[in-house]
Image (cartoon, grey):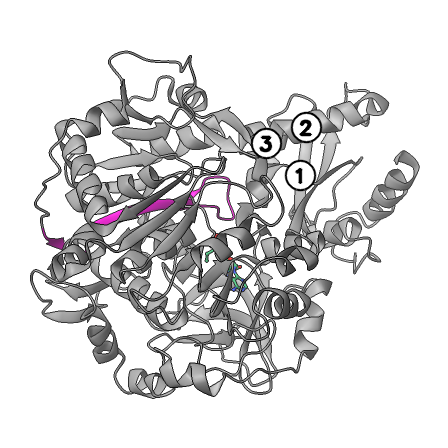
Amino acid sequence: MTEQSPALDNLLTESRTFPPSEAFAAKANATADSYAEANEDREAFWARQAERLHWDTKWSQVLDWSDAPFAKWFVGGKLNVAYNCVDRHVEAGHGDQVAIHWVGEPGDTRDITYAELQREVSRAANGLISLGVTARDRVAIQLQMIPEAIIAMLACARIGAMHSVVFGGFSPSALRQRVDDAQAKIVITSDGQYRRGKAAPMKANVDEALAGAESVEKVLVVRRTGEDDVPWNNGRDLWWHELVEAQSDQHTPEAFDSEHPLYILYTSGTTGKPKGILHTSGGYLTQAAYTHHAVFDHKPGEDVYWCTADIGWVTGHSYIVYGPLANRVTQVVYEGTPNTPHEGRHWEIIQTYKVSLYYTAPTLIRTFMKWGADIPAKYDLSSLRVLGSVGEPINPEAWMWYREHIGGNRCPIVDTWWQTETGSIMISPLPGVTHTKPGSAQRPLPGISAKVVDDAGNEVGKGGGGYLVLDKPWPGMLRGIWGDDERYRETYWSRFSEQGYYFAGDGAKYDADGDVWLLGRVDDVMNVSGHRISTTEVESALVSHPTVAEAAVVGATDPTTGQGIVAFVILRGDVAEDQARGDAAIQELRNHVSKEIGPIAKPRQIMVVPELPKTRSGKIMRRLLRDVAENREIGDVTTLADSSVMDLISSGLKSGS
Ligand code: WT7
């Protein structure tokens, strides 16, 4: 397997464990028995979990895997996902319960009850219908964290249209690529967004993205910042409030097939073209709801939950919208950045709303560590019961800091491993059951099967390392890549085709107890602040700049963001090196990448080099570049076509810096 990053080495010597408190365990949603129960009959276990939902027609078969790797779950069943997330709670007498405590970055707030949410979603659904949106149509959504984002997603689900949410930080060309791939008919965005205390335009970027986009019929614009001169395309653009407020707040949801497509969400793969991950309805909602219930120990009507993700990522889909709302959550949704207007913003929100379940990412925890423990210490965090982590391996120091300074040494930490493709959490401790270990996701959840295997696909023993695979289908699994069945088979099912395993792309290891430790990606995918970015994507962006002849990109260990993007570029012959090495030129290249893909893909560092290390077959040896980027001694160079290249690179960097 590929070498592992040094920051992760210490994970493997970690030996502390934290048993659950008796008081917590006595009331926990999860029980130790559920592992055995699920093992006995996996399909019966998932059928019991599907009973959490309202089905208009019950399924006749739990799983149809006859067309593997294309799964069908709860075959013949019919349900409406939005009805399950909203209406049924109102019908059960919880219309007055707050669904969303929304907190705007400038300090404005809005509490939305389930009854209001039902009316808003119904109006929005009627609005979409009035524009001619029908089942299976694609609606692209590029919105910041405002209630309309959630309402728009649920309105699509309600009428069987598929949403494709595009992260607000993505560039116009990234948005365009996604709109074209999905052939989106409608795009929903806002006039602008508040970010770090300032209003920044959104609509202008969307206009740039959509110039000449033929599939797009209408653009709906939510008014948020109230900019005066929002660019407007008459005939195409409509204000959300004008459309939606004119609609009836009554809408009868239709039941759709369990396998009806729910959404597409694009994620980076090892090539430049993002993959449209396809999720469907019944199985997805079942696993999202079950895992939210068991992993966060969520008690409806008692807990206040807060997942700090953005709806532009899968965490926002499964753990802000679908799982929590299906479970009748009361949750905080926060619009802005964690240090606006001050570095205690999250703790202040937790104190104000008495948040009990908090789900965030290691990169943010490490940022909080940097800001200092004295900041959370100023707030009352005693309402917290469970702390979650997702997005990348959490290092033991960050885990311990989270436990002590946020969780008061009392809250179980759930380190949840999963992917856009898995739809829901797959590997995680269960609070109240698991004796947690700092840095380990530990065990596949009940009903889920995962293994660590060697190159040949054989499971490794305790203490052994290799590749993480999922060896049994699961309800929330992706149903394919939008419009590209072949790429779906190739990407996930070809590596261990003989065994029929899903290859996750992560390295992993068993410890002496058989618990799983995730070790990061083994492919050319970087993980920056929990966001997946492919090296090829950044390389293509770099070579699209007129001064760059060739580029190689690696993810180098970064103390805050997990990995940072480090690029090595060869300049075109006619570009004077001393000029292009200048700060301004490097800055220009960094900005170019940011403009092409989005600010999250901006390289931390760019080094101008005379050559790149390649094998005889022309493949770039990123391993050696990572050694340079991480200031390590350079590893084995014997497979290089020209073994002197690394000397050239190192000496060039020394003299050039
Ligand atoms: C990749 C998936 C799942 C939502 C956020 C990211 C890494 C995710 C963990 C974790 C170690 C993790 C993996 C995975 N990852 N959670 N708890 N421990 N690694 O979703 O963008 O689809 O990325 O994130 O490398 O393959 P994604």
Secondary element at tag 2: helix
Above or below 278: residue 586: above
Q: What kind of residue is marked 3?
A: Ser
* Picture coordinates of residue 433, whole percent (x, y): 44, 83
Q: Which residue is mark 2?
A: 589
Q: Quadrant of residue 292?
A: bottom left
Secondary element at tag 1: loop
Question: Could you give the CA–CA distance between mark 2 and mark 3, rounded to whole angstroms?
Answer: 9 Å
Q: What kind of residue is marked 2?
A: Leu
Where are the magenta residues, as a range? 255-275
Going from N to C along the chain, the mark reached first, 2 or 3, is 2
Is 577 on the left-hand or right-hand side of 307?
right
> Per the image, is 171 magenta?
no
Residues 339 and 580: in front is 339
Q: Which residue is mark 3?
A: 594
Question: Could you give the CA–CA distance between mark 1 and mark 2, rounded to whole angstroms?
Answer: 9 Å
Q: Quadrant of residue 479?
A: bottom left
Going from N to C along the chain, the mark reached first, 1 or 3, is 3
Q: Can I make out residue 216 in this image?
A: no
